[in-house]
Image (tube, grey):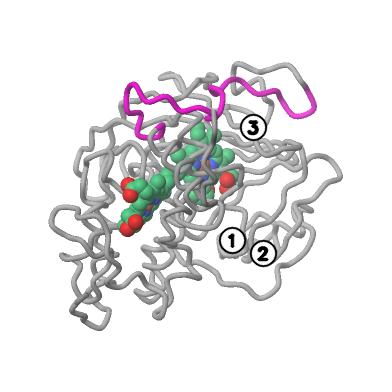
């Protein structure tokens, strides 16, 4: 069979459509080249797959307390991506004697590094004393060629989590910050969905995400210093942008751009599955001169411009975030619940931009 020479961007677009379609789990679509189903991973230093989380030996004491054993380090990111209202705990374990190499922005983990992220829902968002219900613990392990991905789903008794092929919904129920009972389904992604966002990269391991302030066990208040002291990373990054908490106290523009970087930039950026759209949402692409202001796009609910400064109601990207239709909704992937706080933040930001009228 003769193949037409395709433009590289067009090829990437096809590949991104492949992962995007798989992510939307549209029945009957065959996605060649997508990753193998998720399965159990081995404990550090072993090769035998461990079907239960407890067998991985990463935590001490009662498993649900997620108390890291020596060498396993808890960390946090500046801007967390929205996951249906779930809370997250993150851990890293570098192999003995090796460190994560810090560079301009995306850091490089040595082969054998474990990245761990646990998703949970509070019993009552207003009262942390009541604890959390753990739902899922995800893994990325650095290999020679990229990353192995895995996920473990927690049992109701909260005594252990079990390796899962993913692509399933777990019912969750909690009281939110306003005291309203929320009943929803939490989606555990499939391998293709992990790949659609990750594309062989550890997404939070960048200067912009890890330059974070909190109080750490060694008394420091600077996460980069803390990771250096513990020997997880090899150096301080040079001058770099840092994201802020999208729902914190920083100026509106920084919060909006941090939100877009964390929730959209991994696909809409270099090496991302939406690279072919040429619509980039990373922090470095959302400065005043670079916004997709008035950019023409396929009509969504009567809006055909990606972003109309001063007019959130006319901006197509917000219409996509509000839409629950799988082929339209952004971020791409199963719609668990709309991120109302994120939509409100971005709407306030678009309103604050100098008002424009888009003409051809
Ligand atoms: C909607 C996009 C998306 C999907 C789907 C997704 N991830 Fe992620 N993941 C991210 C982003 C963005 C981060 C970095 C921010 C953070 O930690 O919250 C991340 C962080 C992680 C981390 C911490 C290390 C890192 O990359 O920074 C692990 C481990 C992880 N993901 C595993 C998985 C696995 C396994 C799957 C599939 C079962 C998966 N993820 C599906 C977007 C996604
Ligand atoms: C999991 C990957 C992924 C994530 C995350 C994601 N997108 Fe997309 N996006 C895509 C893909 C693939 C397309 C191209 C297919 C389409 O147009 O539906 C796309 C297309 C778009 C378009 C239309 C592009 C055009 O050509 O005009 C907009 C606007 C958009 N996304 C906005 C967003 C926003 C805003 C976010 C974050 C809230 C986001 N996306 C997050 C994958 C993603």
The quarter of the picture where the C terminus appears is bottom left
Label located before the other in sequence (1 or 2): 1
Q: What secondary structure is found at the residue carrying circle 2?
A: loop
Give 346 or 60, whichever is nearer the viewer.
Answer: 346
Pointer 1 local density, CA inside 10 Å: few below 14, some 14–19, many at least 20: few
Q: Residue at x 58, y 27 (%)?
A: 62
Question: Given this view, does label 1 or label 3 mark the residue nearer the observer?
Answer: 3
Q: Residue at x 68, y 56 (%)?
A: 107
**Residue 87 horizontal/vertical position (percent):** 42, 44
- Look at the picture and state if 53 lies above or below 138: above
The quarter of the picture where the N terminus appears is top right
- Judged left or right of residue 154, residue 252 is left
Checking the image for residue 215, the label placed there is 1
- Judged left or right of residue 269, residue 99 is right
Residue of label 3 = 148
Confirm if mark 1 falls within 8 A of ligand 1. Answer: no
**Farthest residue, direction bottom:** 354
Residue of label 2 = 220
Q: CA distance from mark 1 to mark 3?
A: 32 Å
Confirm if mark 3 falls within 8 A of ligand 1. Answer: no
Q: What secondary structure is found at the residue carrying circle 3?
A: strand
Q: Is residue 34 one of those drawn in magenta? A: yes
Q: CA distance from mark 1 to mark 2?
A: 6 Å
Question: Given this view, does label 2 or label 3 mark the residue nearer the observer?
Answer: 3
- Look at the picture and state if 215 lies above or below 32: below
Pointer 2 local density, CA inside 10 Å: few below 14, some 14–19, many at least 20: some
Q: Quadrant of residue 51?
A: top right
- Magenta highlight range: 22-46
**Residue 163 horizontal/vertical position (percent):** 55, 20
Q: CA distance from mark 2 to mark 3?
A: 32 Å
**Residue 30 horizontal/vertical position (percent):** 42, 24
Q: Main secondary structure of the magenta part?
A: loop
């Amino acid at each position: 069979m003769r193949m037409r020479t395709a433009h590289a961007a067009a090829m990437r677009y096809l590949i991104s459509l492949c992962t995007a379609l798989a992510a939307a789990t549209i029945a009957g679509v065959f996605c060649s080249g997508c990753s193998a189903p998720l399965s159990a991973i081995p404990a550090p230093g072993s090769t035998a797959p461990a079907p239960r989380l407890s067998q991985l030996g990463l935590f001490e004491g009662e498993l649900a307390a997620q108390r890291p054993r020596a060498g396993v380090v808890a960390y946090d990111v500046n801007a967390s991506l929205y996951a249906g209202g779930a809370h997250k705990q993150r851990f890293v374990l570098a192999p003995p004697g090796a460190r994560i190499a810090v560079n301009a922005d995306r850091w490089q983990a040595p082969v054998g590094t474990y990245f761990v992220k646990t998703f949970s829902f509070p019993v009552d968002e207003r009262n942390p004393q009541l604890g959390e219900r753990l739902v899922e613990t995800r893994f990325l392990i650095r290999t020679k060629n990229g990353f192995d991905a895995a996920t473990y789903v927690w049992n109701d008794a909260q005594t252990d989590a079990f390796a899962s092929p993913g692509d399933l919904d777990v019912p969750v129920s909690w009281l939110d910050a306003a005291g309203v009972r929320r009943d929803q389904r939490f989606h555990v992604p499939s391998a293709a969905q992990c790949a659609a966002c990750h594309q062989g990269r550890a997404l939070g391991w960048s200067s912009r995400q890890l330059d974070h302030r909190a109080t750490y066990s060694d008394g420091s208040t600077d996460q980069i210093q803390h990771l250096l002291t513990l020997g997880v990373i090899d150096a301080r990054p040079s001058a770099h942008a840092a994201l802020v908490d999208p729902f914190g106290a920083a100026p509106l523009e920084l919060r909006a751009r941090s939100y877009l970087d964390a929730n959209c930039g991994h696909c809409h950026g270099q090496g991302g599955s939406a690279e072919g759209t040429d619509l980039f949402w990373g922090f470095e692409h959302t400065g005043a001169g670079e916004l997709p202001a008035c950019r023409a796009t396929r009509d969504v609910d009567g809006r055909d411009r990606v972003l109309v400064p001063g007019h959130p109601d006319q901006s197509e990207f917000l219409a996509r975030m509000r839409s629950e239709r799988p082929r339209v909704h952004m971020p791409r992937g199963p719609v668990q619940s709309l991120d109302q706080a994120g939509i409100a933040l971005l709407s306030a930001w678009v309103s604050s931009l100098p008002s424009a009228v888009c003409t051809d």
